[in-house]
Amino acid sequence: MIEELEVYNYLRSVDCCRVCCLRFLNGRADDFINIEDALEKRNISSSSDGQGSPPKKVRENTCVACLGLFESELLENLLTEICSSASFKEYDCQAFSSSISLPLVLHLRQLSLWIDLLERFPNRYDNSSSPPDVTVKDAFKMILNRKLEEKLKRPFSTNGVMVNVFFKYADEERELLLLEKVKPEVFVDRKAKKHCRKEFLTRNAFEKHFTPSNLSLKLYREHISVPPAVNDDKLELEMVNFTGPTIFLAGRYNKISRELSQTPWVIDGKRKMENSVQEIMASVVAPYFRVPDDSLIFSSSGREDVDVRCLGEGRPFVLEIPNTYKDYLQESVAAEMEMAIERSKKISVRDLQLVSREELVHIKHGEMDKRKFYRALCVIEKPVTVAVLQALNVEEPFEIEQWTPLRVLHRRPLLSRPRTVYSVKASACRSNERVLIVDIVTQAGTYIKELVHSDFGRTKPSLRSIIGQPIDIHALDVMAIDLDWPKKLRR
Ligand SMILES: [Zn+2]
């Protein structure tokens, strides 16, 4: 305890603020919420200031470690700036997060104090590779986030609207340039490349090249003040801006149209079709989250061709919505969106809900393990016979070899792929004796049209080879997708 007081008194004597003293005394996260209590717990009260040393100054110098970052006036100004910002008010988010950008000069001043404390208090501070203090940034974030929680009456969460705070320091360049004299070799390359001033020294380069154990302390002391020098300049608030969170809206869609692509269909810069599943959804969803339609990123569990319907429970999909202005979705609003999409008469959507990023694994992984359920309307040249129906009633899985279909060769590489067909079941159609309705269950990624007509023998075996006569496919529907996600709602 005595030693803590000694360290405290020393740091105060070289013009460290009380928050920075606590940082070098390894305050815990909670300590920074109430500095006075935390110091008291260490038997350091405000009356400790000045014990056995000159009486307390009326006006304190700017702290040599944080350059005034922890002064209450600066924090109050920042809070006012955030809370009164018109652009912040545009965000309707249930939580917030923060990111703080601080000048690199704070690293330099931390290093000077580190060197100083190592030499003065060798029993307390060892020559380890990481700095001895709770960093300025971490301590400031703890204080700021707590204050923002109180002011905004919203919790801190990494999924909330991000408050980006940028500080600058007028004397930054002059102070950092001194490092060139301590370790010129770090800067040689950079000069040759004529890097812009901003990249004079990156944070990573600083942390790598400037620690007490990997530089000449003698040279350092010759050029840079240990402990850091008092400077009247303070950090200044440069800018505050905001970034909306990224949210994920999941659901299942049915495609009822046989003239609709899943995503915008553009070849050589020309649109082949005026609308798409993705665009119909985006036109309804984007306005609610106050983002442009084309900022949404669509993904789904597989896709169907333009002329294929997707029926049954529907195909699971997710819309990634970056930089959103709203991070919640009420049940009633979700239901209204579903109705609005339904009015397109081309697709319908159900189970619309916000999901977490972690849940995307359902859509992005294991795609090839999934089964797909199709119904094909097929036509043969002669009336359907019992022999044909029997041949097309396969309950045991079988392997096929499928070369890239001719119709997609212009955009896919020429490959032969093995695929599993799990079952085939054909039934006759009452109204037309040449028509067959065939239910097919396959491994994801199987080309169904080619499985039926063989694509000039490029798919083997095919329904054509199984029945030994030409067979054509007139219409195809996806009946089910083997993915029980997202959770089912509102039915
Ligand atoms: Zn300070």
Image (cartoon, rainbow, N blue to C red):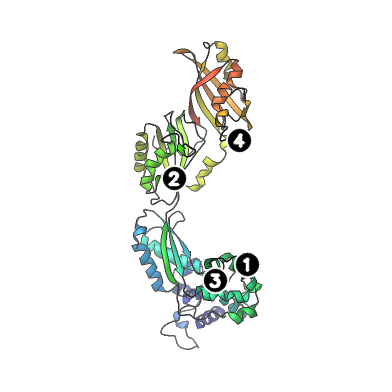
Labels 3 and 2: the sequence-earlier one = 3
Callout 1 amino acid: Asp
Q: Is mark 1 within 8 Å of ligand 1?
A: no
Q: Amino acid at mark 3?
A: His
Question: Label 2 sits on what residue type?
Answer: Leu
Neighbourhood count class around disc 4 (C-alpha, 10 Å): few under 14, some 14–19, many 20 upward: few
The percent coordinates of residue 292 (x first, y second) are: 39, 47
Residue 413 marker: 4
Q: CB of residue at label 3: within 8 Å of ligand 1?
A: no
Image height of 466 relative to 86, above or below: above
Per the image, label 3 sits on a secondary structure element best described as helix
Q: Nearer the viewer, residue 269 or 367?
A: 269
Return the x and y of residue 403 as percentages of the image width and height. Answer: 62, 29
Tell me the amino acid under the disc marked 4.
Pro
Q: Which residue is mark 2?
A: 296
Note whether residue 269 is visible: yes
* Helix, strand or loop for disc 1: helix
Q: Which residue is mark 3?
A: 107
Q: Which residue is mark 1?
A: 189
Residue 345 falls in which quadrant of the image?
A: top left
Q: CA distance from mark 4 to mark 1?
A: 44 Å
- Mark earlier in primary sequence (4, 1): 1
Whole-angstrom CA distance, mark 3 to mark 2, is: 39 Å
